[in-house]
Image (tube, grey):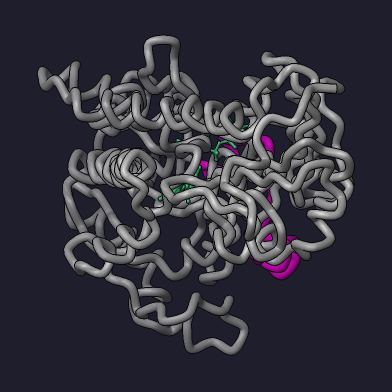
Amino acid sequence: MRIAVVGSGYVGLVAGACFAELGHDVTLVDNDAAKIAALHKGEVPIHERFLPELLQRHRGSRLSFSGNLRQAALESAVIFIAVGTPPTEEGEADLSYVESVAREVAGAVNGGYKIVVEKSTVPVYTSTWVRKVMLLNGAQESSFDVASNPEFLREGTAVTDFLYPDRIVVGADNERCAAVLREIYRPMTDGSYYRGKNAVPGPDGVRVPPRLIVTSTKSAELIKHASNAFLAMKISFINAVASVCENVGADVSQVCEGIGTDSRIGPRFLSPGVGYGGSCFPKDLMAFRAVARECGYDFSLLDEVIRINEDMRQRFLRKVRNALWTLKGKRLAVLGLSFKGGTDDVRESPALCLVELLLKEGSQIVAYDPAATERAREVLGDRVTFAANPYEAAGGADALLVLTDWEEFAALDLDRLREQLRYPIVIDGRNLYNPEQMAAHGIHYYSIGRPPAAPKSQPANAGTAPGSH
Ligand code: UDX
Ligand code: UDX
């Protein structure tokens, strides 16, 4: 099938590369000329596992890049919209990019049958608006349908999330339209893709083929917002439980094991930390809240999810203060700047937010991130020193803070790390280490929702409050 994907960001680029991998002919469109030029040159604009391989495999054969939306739409049977939907000041989704794509595509659908598919996260009723805008701009009623096919990929594991999803959701209001979308995903739903010898390997224990669920377009739009809101709620819930654990001296990791093994709850998205971030959860919660309000429902539960999330940053800051007393002039090593491990994305990163708060307190920050340094530098400039590795960041620091859950941080040489630090204090916002193990390595260790640990023969707060220098 000939497919155009409009918007070559995190979602569009991954979706386009994966559609090509499934055997379709894909044109990736973007109005950012520099991005298209970079893609033409073989560059990979984002850090994402398996994406370089897929781009390399299909570039110039099944995958092409273009700045010409009208032309790409004319040549395609299905047009996926994957442009950004950033929040407005009121917290609603800004749909002006989606609207401008709909306007331009309207002139390219007549004379056959095409489907315009929302891939970006959009509020309920967007498909109705896209249809109206297209009709107003000259598209004939019978020449097109608008569908919703939300994307559930997570950054860092986007390619495998796309190719090995728990489910595929297709929102289509008639069978003709649903049949085309079923056809696009057929190599996945009939299992043929997974039998191919070059298939991207799936995660351990994944079940294939995935189920494809057909719903109305409105339901599909709601499924996306409701999924993200539910996952964010799960994270805020466990973060709130972690705060209670701290107050009573319980261990949140034990509580997680105890509740996560209840199959009705499940173990995933139950990791406490410094709160959720990224380009989706914060924005989508606000947008879902605004949509509900607009439709006459006061979804105040979502306010509380957001409040708990913001509070986690303040709580972490207090934890740093409790470990170090004053923050002014303290040299702090920061591990992790991206909003989560495995990606170079720093949008709405809790780590960046905490670095800003610590800078405001007068701390000196030396930071290390395996992939996000360049993107973080665009935001932080020279207010922060960037180190080439975790040990360099730790050199002479009053404490080490872990702010992102990069796998490689969990495997650090703890003795080497301790020797680098001025004081052996680690404050872990992602619970990457075992408290006893840290204590055994001579480190004063503070984490989320678990009792602090200290080297034998020293009380847990003996590392507290080295003087400022
Ligand atoms: C996506 C979805 O669009 C968003 O709704 C979802 O919630 C998060 O993921 P993402 O892929 O991360 O956003 O966005 P971004 O990386 O900003 O990419 C959007 C791309 O669309 C950019 O490359 C931009 O240049 C392009 N674009 C934007 C267009 O081609 N045309 C436009 O009119 C606007
Ligand atoms: C999310 C959704 O998971 C995905 O389905 C949707 O398509 C886009 O939004 P993403 O933002 O890429 O994906 O990352 P995700 O893995 O969901 O993490 C979001 C944030 O929550 C990160 O800051 C992460 O560190 C945090 N998180 C996640 C936790 O704090 N605890 C957890 O248990 C899981």
- Which one is nearer the viewer's eye here, 294 or 334? 334
- Which one is nearer the viewer's eye here, 181 or 453? 453
Residue beneath the point at 19% across and 39% down: 218
- Which one is nearer the viewer's eye here, 193 or 321? 321
Toward the left, the furthest residue is 296
Residue beneath the point at 63% across and 51% down: 458
Is 278 located above or below residue 90 in the figure?
below
Residue beneath the point at 34% across and 52% down: 250
Q: Give coordinates of residue 79: x percent, y percent.
A: 46, 45
Residue beneath the point at 61% across and 53% down: 454
Q: Is residue 61 visible?
A: no
Highlighted magenta segment, given as a residue range: 49-74
Q: Give coordinates of residue 448: x percent, y percent.
A: 47, 45
Q: Give coordinates of residue 254: x percent, y percent.
A: 35, 62
Q: Which quarter of the frame holds ligand 1?
A: top right
Q: Is residue 160 visible?
A: yes
- Split into 4 quadrants, where in the image is the C terminus? top right
- Which one is nearer the viewer's eye here, 239 or 197? 239
Location of residue 186 (image quadrant): bottom left
- Position of 433 with respect to 274 (left or right) is right
Is 107 located above or below residue 7 in the figure?
above
- Position of 457 with respect to 109 (left or right) is right
Location of residue 33 (image quadrant): top right
Q: Give coordinates of residue 205: x percent, y percent.
A: 41, 81
